Image (tube, rainbow, N blue to C red):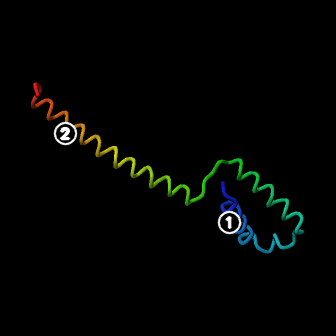
Amino acid sequence: MSAKGPRDFLNQFAAIAGPGLESLSSEIRQQIRTAAQAAFEKMDIVTREEFEAQQAVLLRSREKLEALEQQVAELEALIRENPNT
């Protein structure tokens, strides 16, 4: 998993939490950031880019499968029409 995802999440969290986080010492903030980073890495989640790339691969595979199924159906129809050929 890339560090970009959790880093973006933590930045968004910091923006939402706003002033409350400002009062924390930088050491505590770093410890929270490190703990959150470790937790995200254990979650086995993917980035949006990785998800979209896999989605595109799946779509292409599905299209190829449908084309092959159509070809098989056409060949089966030919065999039924001409069983001795």
Q: Position of residue 78 (x, y in %)?
A: 14, 34
Q: Secondary structure at mark 2?
A: helix
What amino acid type should be assigned to the residue bearing mark 2? Glu
* Residue at 10% across, 25% down: 84
Q: Position of residue 33 (x, y in %)?
A: 79, 61
Residue located farthest toward the front when viewing the structure as drawn: 85
Disc number lying in front (2 or 1): 2
Q: Nearer the viewer, residue 55 or 74?
A: 74
Instruction: Give yes or no for contact between labels 2 and 1 (Cβ–Cβ under 8 Å).
Output: no
Q: Position of residue 36 (x, y in %)?
A: 76, 56
**Residue 18, above or below 1:** below
Q: Nearer the viewer, residue 5 or 74?
A: 74
Report the quarter where the C terminus lies: top left
Q: Nearer the viewer, residue 16 or 66?
A: 66
User: Circle 1 is placed at which residue position?
Assistant: 8
Numbered disc total: 2
**Would you say 27 lies left or right of 47 here?**
right
Badge 1 local density, few (<14 within 10 Å), some, or many (20+)?
few
What amino acid type should be assigned to the residue bearing mark 1? Asp
* Residue at 55% across, 56% down: 50
Q: Secondary structure at mark 1?
A: helix
* Residue at 69% across, 68% down: 12
* Residue at 87% across, 72% down: 23
User: Circle 2 is placed at which residue position?
Assistant: 74
**Residue 74, above or below 40:** above
Residue located farthest toward the top when viewing the structure as drawn: 84
